[in-house]
Image (spheres, grey):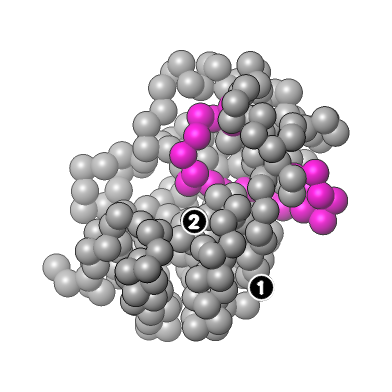
Amino acid sequence: MNGTKLLIQGINELGIQITDQQVAQFLKYYEMLVEINKVMNLTSIVDFNDVITKHFIDSLLSVKTVDMEKFQTMIDVGTGAGFPGIPLKIVFPHLNVTLLDSLNKRLLFLNDVIKELKLKDICTVHGRAEDLGKNQNYREKFDICVSRAVANLSTLSEYCIPFISEGGKFISYKSEFSEEEKNSAEKAIDILGGKIEKRDIVKLPYTNINRSFIVIHKIKQTPDKYPRKAGMPLKKPLK
């Protein structure tokens, strides 16, 4: 199956119909990603079909666990090459998206992508989650936080939950997720004002890969002392 057909059918399998313009945006994003990857290591996955499935469709899999139409403001923490934030923005243009990363050169690339794809209501922010989570411009300002970043759930929760407003959700994309990791994160999530709502396992179309989604509902404000200073959530996860 050629890549364009794979993209359209894969997204259709998620219950989403996309326009010719959205297809063109994905194809342009792919071109730009492969080109910048020659000089900046953003992804080890560069084959067209693999990027379609393992980056673009994978980024959209969260639609099987939450209804994106219900959210207005989204932050993608540790966005890297723009996943999952940019694919979600392409497919759900109503979302007002903030892409957060600690490496500025990644964000310079994403700014070029945003401009080239003519995306509106999307911005990049350079900084560490621990610092920006204390910044009143970002703290508890978002309906939903998504993250494909690789870290244990306790650490990710301390990075992400402070950004969500009460009643909002944090969606953690995980390749593997054990009962042990869930149990060790529950107290941290409670301290930060959240509660695990559900865990869904979703199969990535056209692969034998399963993706775990942990949906955390924010039920109360995060105490002022969190997130702790930069480096601490990773070094000493809350227990």
Image quarter for residue 6?
bottom left
Magenta stretch: residue 217 in it? no
Q: Which residue carries the number 2 mark?
A: 80
Q: Amino acid at mark 2?
A: Gly
Question: What is the C-alpha distance between the residues marked 2 and 1?
Answer: 19 Å
The span shown in magenta is 133-155
Question: Mark 1: which secondary structure?
Answer: loop
Residue shown at 38% from the left, 79% from the top? 28
Q: Is residue 2 above or below residue 171?
A: below
Residue 216 coordinates in the image, percent (x, y): 61, 35
Query: In the drawing, what numbered circle is on residue 121?
Result: 1
Q: Is residue 184 left or right of residue 139?
A: left
Magenta stretch: residue 153 in it? yes
Question: Mark 2: which secondary structure?
Answer: loop
Asked whether residue 165 is in view, the answer is no
Mark sitting earlier along the chain (2/1): 2
Observer-side mark, 2 or 1, equals: 2
Q: Is residue 101 above or below residue 22?
A: above
* Quadrant position of the N terminus in the picture: bottom left
Residue shown at 59% from the left, 62% from the top? 104
Q: Is residue 174 left or right of residue 169?
A: left
Characterize the local packing of mark 2: few (<14), some (14-19) or many (20 or more) Cα atoms within 10 angstroms: many
Q: Is residue 135 above or below residue 52?
A: above
Characterize the local packing of mark 1: few (<14), some (14-19) or many (20 or more) Cα atoms within 10 angstroms: few
